[in-house]
Image (cartoon, grey):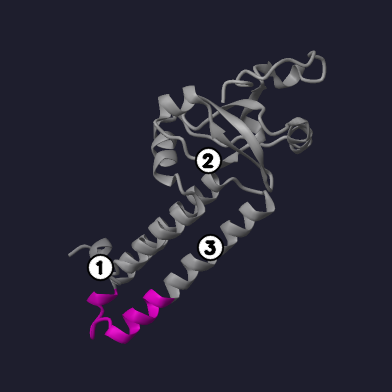
Amino acid sequence: MGYYDMDLRDVPGGLKPEMEQSIEAALLAQVREEAKTRNDAVARGNETPTLAAALLDKFGWGISKTASALGVRSTHLQREVDRLVREIDTNFDEHRKKRWAAQPAGIVFVDKERNQGLTQKLTPGDVITHKVCGGGIQEHVFTGTDGAWICGYPTNDTAMIERCRIHTNDISPTNVTHVNRIAVEALDYAAPRRRPYEGLE
C-alpha cells in the first residue's frame, strides 16, 4: 500500500464509528454554511444562480474528496451537495452541460450602471434577446425583475428550440443584446416601434 492510498482507517486502531460520524457531521455543516453564503450572494444580486450553484458544486466536490481522504465513506455528503445546488439553480443540470461544452468556460464581469439603466427601460411585454451559457441565443417576453435578474417567458421560437416553456427568473442584464429587436446600445436613439409579439399572444 502506497502513502497516498492510506487514510485514517489505516491508522493503528482504525477510525472509530463515532469519530467518523462526527467528521461527517462537521463536513455537512460546512457544505450547508457554504450553500447559505451562496444563496445570500444571489439574494443581494452579487451572483447569478448559475454561478452560485457552480461554485457550491465545486466546493462540495472538494469536501467529498476531503471526506474520502480522511476515510469517511459517506454517501450523505454528495447527496446533500446535489440537493443544495439544485435549490439554488433549478436548471443546474442543463447549465452544467452548457458550461462543460463551452471551450473555454469563463466569467463575465458586470457593468452595474449599464444593467440598472437597461432594466429601468424595460416594460412588461418587451421581447428581450440574450446570450446563454454555451454561446446560444434565446428570447423571452419580459415580465419583471427578481432583484438584479430579469424574468420572463420564452417566446414561441425559443420554446420550440429549447423544448421548454418555463418562466425564468435568472436572466442577467449583462447578457441582453436587444430589446424588441433593437440593439441595447441604440435604445436611447431608436424611435418607438411595435413589439415583435404585440397582438400575437
Task: List the residue tagged with mark 3.
Answer: 34
Side of 43 where 82 appears, left or right: left
SS at badge 1: loop
Q: Position of residue 57 (x, y in %)?
A: 44, 53
Give the dominant element type of the magenta stretch: helix, strand or loop. helix
Is residue 18 inside the magenta stretch?
yes
Of labels 2 and 1, the one closer to you = 2
Q: Which corner quadrant of the image does residue 4 belong to?
A: bottom left
Q: Which corner quadrant of the image does residue 85 belong to?
A: bottom left
Give the residue at the far right of this rendering: 189
Estimate the spatial distance between the alpha carbons at disc 2 and disc 3, rounded to whole Å: 27 Å
Kindly identify the amino acid type of the residue bearing the numbered disc 2. Answer: His
Is residue 190 inside the magenta stretch?
no
Q: Is residue 123 above or below residue 49?
A: above
Does the residue at mark 2 contact the one at mark 3 (Cβ under 8 Å)?
Answer: no
Label 3 Cα neighbours within 10 Å, binned few <14 / some 14-19 / many ≥20: some
SS at badge 2: loop
Of labels 3 and 1, the one closer to you = 3
- First to last magenta residue range: 8-25
Task: List the residue tagged with mark 1.
Answer: 6
Residue at 25% of width from left, 68% of height from top? 6
Residue at 41% of width from left, 63% of height from top? 63
Task: List the residue tagged with mark 2.
Answer: 167
Q: Is residue 9 above or below residue 55?
A: below
